[in-house]
Image: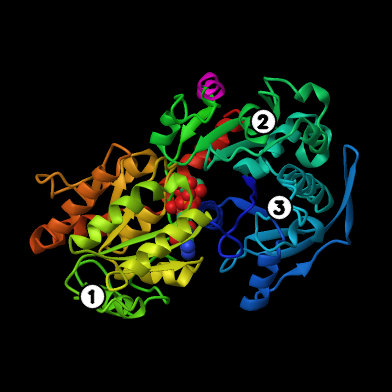
Amino acid sequence: MRILFASAEVSPIAKTGGLGDVVGSLPKELAKMGHEVILFMPLYRQARDWFERSGEIVEQTLPTTQILWANWAAEATFFRATLPGTDIPLYLVGNNHFFNRDQIYSPRPDGYDDGVERYAFFCRAVIRGCELLSIAPEIVHAHDWHTALLPAYLHSGLRTSDAFRSTRSVYTIHNLNYQGIGSPAQFAAVGLHSRYWAPDALEHFGQVNLMKGGIIFADQITTVSPNYAREIQTPALGAGLDGVLRSLSFKLTGILNGIDMDEWNPATDPHTPANYEAGQLDGKALSKHSLLDEARLRSKPKRPLFSFVSRLVDQKGVDLLIPALGHMLRAGANAVILGSGEGRYETALAQIGSEYSERCRVWIGFDNALAHRIYAGADLLLMPSIYEPCGLNQMYALRYGTLPVVRMTGGLADTVIPFDGTNEESANGFGFVMPDPADLYTAAWLGMLNYREARVWKHLQTNAMAEDFSWERSAREYESTYQRAMGG
Ligand code: ADP
Ligand code: GLC
């Protein structure tokens, strides 16, 4: 099959979270299976910088083209590269006004949030790019709200164009809580006929909702874990779209994310001070020593070292972490924290870092290499998420023999088997259910206790490192989903 991926993030070129990781790695597995995959992403300033730093080739591939839609016109410059380390074509859509900004998701310089306009432009440019480059995809695979307009555009008559005559769409929800919502006025920027301004199309309680359009008009919908696929059909976690999802559940599948087994491999990781594998953990001990040095945590290395690597937003349970952390540190834990996001969380965590400077190091920022060193060097990873569509961090941690302490929600419940004192044959981490700091503390405390039980710990670590989160199985499930979309 010829499969076109369109995404706002592609790792390692531009990423703020797991969306980039997934779109940067699933195509490799599909290509291995014999499919032809083509990627499109925006040429952000950050992407341009990445190419400059890495020395990888990126070249303009078409003369600058006017993209016309509704009453809008904007210029797109198409660049061609390959997904790093592969020969999978990657097209980048350049437009300074929309994509040359301080952050990937910055609003306009005057503060106006033009997300709807930016990504409507991007989706229109993807379509025009396919026409000009004679790419006729059988599947358009769109991801999250940014590219949710593609299924709607395909539905709205594009099938008369040669490039899309036999194209079907698959839409993957990585996070239902970011929906791409805009004012009624912004609906004009979408460039769809007014009949799409309706409750069974893009209108949602008087606003334009791009995610809703993706859900309704895609031939198949997926989300990133089986458990989250169930949860989003409930009012509690359906973010106002549970009714729509329930009524369309016949085309909804939960497919657990895989991880890039080459990038996240403790045996070969170039970012860590030492390499190691299951049964041969000297390198992990060295990585811990070196991480403690880097964190300037002089206290005893025998203490369990907790970690937290995350976007700092309420989804990630920072409101549970902040009250629990002080108790954990006083009970004898060390902790390293790497994150960036909302100011109130950055400030509160930095404050804990200075209050407990002997035991806790807080880095505010985004640093991929440091994230690798943390997964390798820590003993435990905290993920007290309020909701978690899949979560990749816990899978990375498991692979590095770092035991996750998670709230049992979404994909965390599909990947972590909590230790209950009796199941050391199968358990690979620690868990809690209620979104309460005391319950997080109890689970973390259980982790600390068992850290001191060398035999149990070794067992759990071995279980963790034996988990297979490679893309192979999930890629087969995507393949079946593509076939269903094509009517097979
Ligand atoms: P989400 O996509 O909701 O942020 P995931 O667990 O799926 O959560 O993916 C998070 C990804 O982002 C992982 O690759 C993680 O290592 C990375 N990440 C998150 N915050 C940081 C940070 N501050 N520095 C480096 N990497 C980070
Ligand atoms: C989202 C989710 C995360 C998931 C990632 C990749 O950002 O928050 O749970 O792992 O997408 O699918």
| Colouring mode (rainbow / by chain / secondary structure / one colour) | rainbow
Q: Residue 477: x percent and y percent?
A: 46, 40
> Of helix, strand and loop, which mostly describes the magenta segment?
helix
Q: Residue 191: x percent and y percent?
A: 82, 35
User: First in sequence: mark 2 or mark 1?
Assistant: 2
Between disc 1 and disc 3, the foreground one is 3
Vertical order, 451 against 320 (above or below): below
Indicate yes or no whether the magenta region holds residue 245. yes
The amino acid at mark 2 is Gly
Magenta extent: 243-249
* Label 1 residue SS: helix
Quickly name the residue at label 3: 107
Quadrant in which residue 143 is drawn:
top right
Which residue is at the front of the view, 386 or 75?
386
Which residue is at the front of the view, 372 or 156?
372
Residue at mark 1 to residue at mark 3: CA–CA distance: 44 Å
Residue at mark 2 to residue at mark 1: CA–CA distance: 50 Å
Mark 3 CB in 8 Å range of ligand 2? no
User: First in sequence: mark 2 or mark 3?
Assistant: 3
* Label 3 residue SS: loop
How many residues crowd around disc 3 within 10 Å: few (fewer than 14), some, or many (20 or more)? some
The amino acid at mark 3 is Pro
Quadrant in which residue 152 is drawn:
top right
Residue at (55, 27) in percent of width and height: 241
Quickly name the residue at label 1: 285
